[in-house]
Image (cartoon, rainbow, N blue to C red):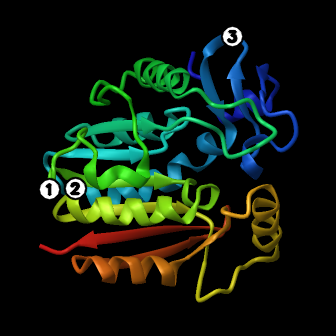
Amino acid sequence: MFANKNAVDDGVPFQVSNPDEPGMGHGKMGWLTYDTERFFSVAAERNKAVIGENVVRHLSVVQTGTVLEIGSGSGQHIAYLAKQLPQLKFKPTEYHGHPNPLAESQEAEKMLVSIRKTALEAEANNVLDAQVLDACELASWSGAGDGSLAAIICINVVHISPEAVLQGIVRGASKKLAAGGLLFFYGPWCVDGQISPESNVRFDCMLREKNPAFGIRDISSLARLCAEEGNLEVKERIFVDASNNYFLSVRKAG
């Protein structure tokens, strides 16, 4: 049976491998004790519906194409989205390492196995095989041709990565998205240097203490990066009160 938020909150046992601050402040996550090849995140289970609602709103009119997810983690998001949009194919990816210096180093191949198993259990048959991707090198990645992607999705990644990751995603989106394609972000963002609410200010401080290269990114910086590419524009920003996160959509011209 597929684990869900309520089941985990009600005490279904799972082992959290991060010994101090699990998931860089993203809450409970770890390897399920009843399936040690499956990684599970309570936060992903909780926020997949609001993310899905916004992604589906944009992509339900797209009849065919491939959607790339950067940093698929447990695979819960991509499996859920794939079920909501059966006409599209979804490509999950992950990368080596772990942003939390107190956590066990994340083996990409182990995470890819988890993503595959999550998609299989969800019967999301339109999820393609998971691959390793360094988002900094998206523009030159051989896993997707130039102009081939209908959309790119990036959930809770850029604030727990060096700024070069955000730059690489934008640069890659400029090349890999089809004309009119969309780049989606979900996570904490600030606006013109202002972080709110106070809980996000504390979160940003915690991130920077763990790694000075991390931190909540600015929507204005994203807009500037898009403008530098010449064919991308931030078209929408939605603040999600329940999580203090933003859902952002960026469109490629065409």
Mark 3 residue crowding within 10 angstroms, few (<14) / some (14–19) / many (20+) = few
| Local SS, label 3 | loop
Q: Amino acid at mark 1?
A: Gly
Mark 1 residue crowding within 10 angstroms, few (<14) / some (14–19) / many (20+) = some
Q: State the image coordinates of residue 239 (x, y, percent, origin top left).
A: 57, 73
Mark 2 residue crowding within 10 angstroms, few (<14) / some (14–19) / many (20+) = many
Residue linked to disc 1 = 147
Separation of marks 2 and 1 at Cα, in angstroms: 5 Å
Q: Amino acid at mark 3?
A: Tyr
Q: In the figure, residue 224 lies in which quadrant? A: bottom left
Q: Is residue 61 left or right of residue 134?
A: left
Sequence order check: which comes first, mark 2 or mark 1?
1
- Residue at image position (19%, 57%) is 61
In which quadrant is the C terminus drawn? bottom left
- For residue 176, the mark is 2
Separation of marks 2 and 3 at Cα, in angstroms: 39 Å
Residue linked to disc 3 = 34
Q: Mark 3 and 1 residues: CB-CB less than 8 Å, in contact? A: no
Q: Residue furthest bottom?
A: 192
